[in-house]
């Protein structure tokens, strides 16, 4: 085992910050805290997509910002790879912590692994089994590269074991994003965003849509006219992701109904307050499927699949399919979900980051210590196997 005295976390996109913030806080609370360095790749760069989250969640200014910005997947990932290497060489952390499934996650993990710096993945093992999703590729590769895999739902371990990942690398710590939600709950209640926006508590729909599969093609126009239709039954609050706003602009799409309230992306506390006061959410986001399950708010996911099946099996999530025509059904479906027995998955309790830091404090195993990674060695370089590793 290698002791961990210096942790370097990499964030790039908005949800990464929610997943990492409680770990930074839990590290700082320890008796002898490990040193922590935060690197922001700059994948998300708008004030509303990045800075506001660092401020709200009390995360210090990143030590380094890599300004990778937007681009094709290749260009964006390549910039992460190129720009993070000198940072890792200079800092030489004992472990690199990467959250989620965005391009920054896989870029940072690849560079660290090649520098033989151990990698830990927060939110490991999620699978949509849909390789047309860029995030699925990022998840698969990041998990293979990671020494420590922190999971938050039971099926994540099964997915990893099926891919040949050693059980000793997997740690079911729970959901660090829910830690952030728990920590912010008093503030979100105090804010009362529905009242501030003139929305009827329990009587409006929150919508977020940003995935390329939905917004980059013809489906976006269908989604917009279906939302215009829903707005006849209940007001719709729609904070628009920059990608979606750009696609609407370039295609000349607009809402006709005044019942659809368009917003700029909201801060975290305000968004959660809107979510908690709503009748339900319609989304293609990953994180919102989890947050609604925790809050007990019905969620309708406009995707063909989900890498978070636990939110459908135990929680409030319903997979509608990549089918904007089903948006019209949402007002009628709400009651059915409210009557369904729902449970919050184990480990979604506000204490996941503490458990994660317990694992870090125990140290990180070398690859040589893990079954399945024993090497064929040149004559003369034989090292006797340790207890418990013999008999294969
Ligand atoms: C990324 C993640 C996605 C995650 C989402 C959360 C990948 C492959 N995708 O998607 O998994 O759910 O973040 O929000 O990493 N833009 C701005 N300002 C910004 C950021 C983006 O205007 O601060 C615009 C740019 O036009 C850019 C587009 O949004 O081209 C998309 O941004 P990008 O980072 O490529 O992916 P997201 O769609 O945000």
Image (spheres, rainbow, N blue to C red):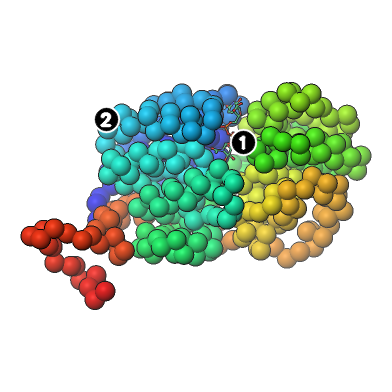
- Asked whether the viewer can see residue 227, the reply is no
**Residue drawn 48% across the image and 33% down it:** 74
Q: Is mark 2 within 8 Å of ligand 1?
A: no
**Residue drawn 73% across the image and 56% down it:** 318
The number of callouts visible is 2
Q: Nearer the viewer, residue 148 or 357?
A: 148
**Residue drawn 80% across the image and 31% down it:** 261
- Asked whether the viewer can see residue 387, the reply is yes
Give coordinates of residue 310: x percent, y percent: 61, 60
In the image, residue 5 above or below residue 86: below
Name the quadrant of the C terminus. bottom left
**Residue drawn 87% across the image and 53% down it:** 332
Ligand 1's image quarter is top right
In the image, residue 234 above or below residue 170: above
| Residue identified by numbered label 1 | 268
Marker disc for residue 382: none
Badge 1, how many Cα within 10 Å: few under 14, some, many 20+? many
Name the quadrant of the N terminus. bottom left
Give coordinates of residue 247: x percent, y percent: 71, 28
User: Among all residues in the image, which is located at the extreme bottom?
Assistant: 391
Q: Nearer the viewer, residue 19 or 301?
A: 301
| Residue identified by numbered label 2 | 90
Give coordinates of residue 314: x percent, y percent: 65, 63
Give coordinates of residue 78: x percent, y percent: 43, 31
Which tag, 2 or 1, sits closer to the chain's start?
Answer: 2
Whole-number angstrom distance, CA of label 2 to CA of label 1: 33 Å
């Amino acid at each position: 085992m290698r002791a961990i005295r210096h942790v370097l976390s990499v964030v790039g996109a908005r949800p990464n910050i929610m997943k990492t913030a409680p770990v930074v806080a839990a590290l700082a609370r320890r008796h002898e805290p490990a040193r922590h360095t935060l690197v922001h790749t700059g994948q998300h760069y708008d004030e509303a997509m990045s800075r506001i989250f660092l401020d709200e969640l009390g995360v210090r200014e990143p030590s380094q910002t890599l300004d990778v910005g937007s681009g094709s997947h290749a260009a964006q990932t390549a910039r992460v790879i190129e720009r993070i290497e000198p940072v890792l060489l200079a800092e030489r952390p004992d472990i690199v912590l990467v959250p989620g499934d965005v391009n920054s996650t896989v870029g940072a993990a690849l560079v660290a692994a090649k520098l033989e710096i151990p990698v830990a993945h927060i939110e490991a093992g999620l699978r949509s089994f849909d390789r047309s999703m860029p995030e699925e590729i990022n998840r698969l590769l990041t998990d293979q590269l990671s020494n420590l895999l922190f999971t938050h739902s039971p099926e994540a371990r099964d997915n990893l074991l099926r891919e040949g990942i050693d059980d000793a690398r997997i740690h079911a710590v729970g959901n660090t994003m829910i830690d952030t939600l728990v920590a912010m709950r008093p503030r979100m209640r105090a804010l009362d965003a529905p009242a501030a926006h003139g929305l009827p508590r329990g009587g409006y729909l929150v919508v977020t849509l940003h995935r390329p599969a939905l917004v980059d093609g013809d489906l976006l126009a269908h989604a917009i006219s279906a939302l215009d239709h829903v707005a006849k039954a209940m007001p719709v609050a729609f904070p628009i992701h920059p990608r979606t706003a750009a696609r609407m602009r370039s295609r000349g799409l607009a809402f006709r109904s005044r019942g659809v309230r368009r917003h700029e992306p909201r801060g975290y506390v305000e968004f959660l307050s809107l979510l908690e006061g709503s009748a339900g959410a319609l989304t293609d986001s990953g994180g919102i499927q989890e947050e609604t399950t925790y809050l007990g708010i019905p969620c309708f996911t406009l995707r063909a699949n989900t890498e978070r099946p636990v939110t459908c099996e135990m929680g409030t999530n319903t997979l509608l399919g990549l089918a904007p025509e089903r948006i019209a059904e949402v007002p009628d479906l709400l009651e059915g979900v409210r009557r369904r027995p729902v449970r919050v998955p184990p480990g979604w309790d506000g204490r996941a980051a503490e458990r994660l830091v317990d694992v870090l404090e125990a140290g990180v195993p070398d690859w040589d210590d893990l079954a399945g990674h024993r090497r064929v060695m040149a004559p003369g370089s034989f090292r006797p196997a340790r207890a418990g590793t013999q008999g294969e």
